[in-house]
């Protein structure tokens, strides 16, 4: 049986104030899945981990790739199963949509093997069901951009209603990942149940303007709108040195900095590569002052999302 090879990018989800609704695919990082048809069921025959990840299960019911594959097969109503080989490029628990990338790649691979009956939009549901099992919440701000590319917005989870917004071509994203793990499940437990009306209005306005910025390819508007007064102050406490890293990123010229997803990755933005290098250096050095080693990268929007690469 022939193998198909699929890549799905890392994602920032949420983008700042757009908690659980705004997500963004980024270049240079992602997961790769090779898949082939088998007679029945879902089998994960191998996993190459990213870095020192040890918590990856080849049990298809405990791995988002396996769950997404099973859910996609169910929707396709086909006889037959799939064997998967997973190559992780995104560390688990980094806030870069690791589990969503595996799920998106597996869903696309199964669809490709079984006649491409489903659109990428239709693959968001099986991918998000897989994400739900590991994250403790049903949200598509990582799975949708991993599949569709660019920035995406979720209007509703049930029924799932997601739209691709667009991209910002000039945007340079400085990703810095401290060598600690934050599980989404845990980072959701600490969030407040109720928020003041003024914070709601502030975050809603900034979320709306980020949406407009990606629709209009307007970097300056995005730079003005990357502000979150609800989630960031709470989750920042999980990231040692966050306030100082942000202060130094802004001093080095960043137009904004916040947490990627549930962290610990943080990202800063600029529209100039020369500045991006200075900002990256300032952020990495500040984390180091707190005794934290980092993985870091300057990247941009991935406008394409999950794709077949063979
Ligand atoms: N929107 C989710 C959260 C994504 O921030 O909890 C986690 O990757």
Image (cartoon, rainbow, N blue to C red):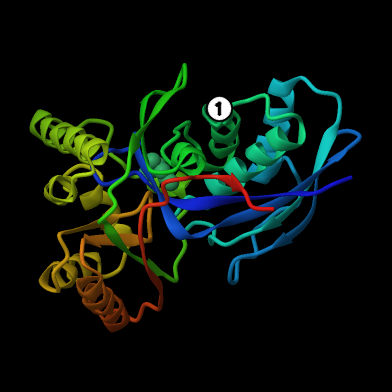
Q: Could you say which is closer to the camera, residue 251 or residue 235?
A: 251
Determine the residue positioned at 37% across, 42% down.
23
Determine the residue positioned at 68% across, 24% down.
117
Q: Could you say which is closer to the camera, residue 65 or residue 233?
A: 65
- Name the spot of residue 245 as percent of width and height, x first: 22, 70
The residue lying furthest to the top in this view is 159
Residue of label 1: 125
Q: Is residue 177 above or below residue 118?
A: below
**Count of numbered labels shown in the rendering:** 1
Q: Is residue 243 above or below residue 207?
A: below
In the image: residue 195, left or right of residue 132: left
Q: Looking at the rendering, in which quadrant would you find the N terminus?
A: top right
> How many other residues sit within 10 Å of disc 1, few (<14), some (14-19) or many (≥20)?
many
Q: Quadrant of ligand 1?
A: top left
- Mark 1 lies on a secondary structure that is helix
- Name the spot of residue 110 as percent of width and height, x first: 72, 36
The residue lying furthest to the left in this view is 198
In the image: residue 283, left or right of residue 51: left
Determine the residue positioned at 38% across, 43% down.
150
- Name the spot of residue 74 as percent of width and height, x first: 73, 23
- In the picture, residue 128 is in which quadrant? top right
């Amino acid at each position: 049986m022939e193998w198909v090879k699929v890549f799905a990018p890392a994602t920032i989800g949420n983008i700042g104030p757009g908690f659980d609704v705004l997500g963004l695919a980024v270049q240079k990082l992602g997961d790769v899945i090779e898949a082939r048809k088998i007679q029945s069921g879902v089998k994960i025959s191998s996993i190459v981990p990213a870095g020192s990840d040890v918590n990856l299960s080849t049990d298809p019911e405990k791995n988002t790739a396996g769950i997404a594959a099973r859910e996609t097969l169910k929707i396709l109503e086909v006889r037959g199963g799939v064997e998967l080989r997973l190559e992780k490029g995104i560390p688990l628990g980094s806030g870069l949509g690791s589990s969503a990338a595996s799920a998106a790649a597996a869903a696309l691979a199964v669809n490709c093997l079984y006649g491409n009956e489903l659109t990428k939009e239709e693959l968001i549901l099986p991918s998000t069901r897989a994400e739900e099992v590991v994250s403790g919440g049903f949200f598509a701000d990582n799975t949708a951009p991993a599949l569709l590319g660019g920035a995406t917005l979720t209007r509703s989870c049930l029924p799932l209603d997601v739209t691709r917004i667009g991209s910002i071509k000039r945007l340079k994203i400085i990703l810095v990942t401290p060598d600690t793990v934050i599980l989404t499940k845990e980072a959701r437990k600490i969030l407040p149940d109720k928020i003041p009306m003024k914070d709601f209005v502030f975050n809603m306005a900034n979320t709306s303007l980020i949406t407009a910025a990606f629709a209009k390819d307007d970097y300056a508007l995005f730079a003005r709108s990357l502000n979150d007064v609800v989630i960031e102050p709470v989750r920042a406490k999980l990231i040692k040195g966050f306030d100082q890293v942000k202060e130094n990123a802004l001093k080095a010229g960043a137009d904004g900095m916040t947490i990627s997803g549930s962290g610990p990755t943080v990202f800063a933005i600029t529209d100039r590569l020369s500045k991006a290098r200075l900002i990256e250096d300032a952020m990495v050095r500040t984390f180091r002052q707190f005794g934290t080693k980092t993985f870091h990268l300057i990247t941009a929007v991935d406008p394409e999302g999950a794709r077949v690469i063979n």
